[in-house]
Image (cartoon, rainbow, N blue to C red):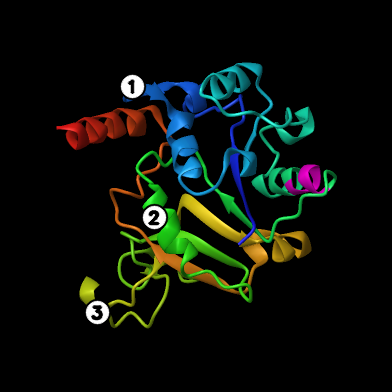
Amino acid sequence: MNTLVVIPARGGSKGIPRKNIRPFAGKPLICYTIDTARALVPDTDICVSTDDDEIIRVVESYGLGVPFKRPAELATDSAGTYEVLLHALDFYEKQGRHYDTLILLQNTSPFRTAEHVREAMALYTPDIDMVVSVKECAANPYYCVFEENPAGFLSVCKGDGKIYRRQDAPKVYEYNGALYIINTASLKKQHMHQFAKRIKYVMDERSSFDLDTPQDWLIAEMMAQENKE
């Protein structure tokens, strides 16, 4: 496949300030994602999309060129990843470089590896929209997720209320944010959330760990230390 890897790295992260370049287990967090991308494609097919000069300096000091500085309107709190991906594709297409697939790797999954991405890539075919990484939901809506019904009482969100054991409930999955392998033709037609042909790639709980809060960061550093030991 002719593949572009896009690594979004906005400077104004709120949950964990400056998280993309914050030192994690010995090096800036973004470098783990760059290492993963480099195990998959040449540097010329890796696009770090950022609006931040300091992030650009860190990435370039790691030996990877940054092809452009992301426009300010695509770096606000309300800007979406979808628009960022289209902007990256458009940048390369204007240079005559066209990609069949796009791999989105977010920096908040430090335990995702190149092997995970390769396994997911093996599931991809040109007739689908996307392969997306997931983990099994801990809170299964057929068993332990409730909503208030019109009468004001709690009822199970899904199913008929006759599932009494967790193991009897159908498996359900949630995105873990670790990797997305996207058909670029599909991406140009519609938002990723509108894709009808999505195939799951299941990852374990540890590999799926996502950095969203300062508490997550502390836990992840302990996990990384356990890996070293």
Query: Given the image, on which type of amino acid does mark 3 rest?
Result: Asp
| First along the sequence among labels 3 and 2 | 2
Q: Is residue 229 above or below residue 17?
A: below
Query: Dot 1 corresponds to which residue?
Result: 26
Q: Are marks 3 and 2 in contact (CB under 8 Å)?
A: no
Query: Dot 3 corresponds to which residue?
Result: 168
| First along the sequence among labels 1 and 2 | 1
Q: Is residue 215 above or below residue 170?
A: above
Query: Dot 2 corresponds to which residue?
Result: 116
Residue 170: quadrant of the picture: bottom left
| First along the sequence among labels 1 and 3 | 1
Distance Cα–Cα, label 1 vs label 3: 43 Å
Residue drawn at x 73%, y 65% is 185
Q: Is residue 36 above or below residue 60?
A: below
Distance Cα–Cα, label 1 vs label 2: 22 Å
**Dot 1 alpha-carbon crowd within 10 angstroms: few under 14, some 14 to 19, many 20 or more:** few
Which quarter shows the C terminus? top left
Query: Given the image, on which type of amino acid does mark 2 rest?
Result: His
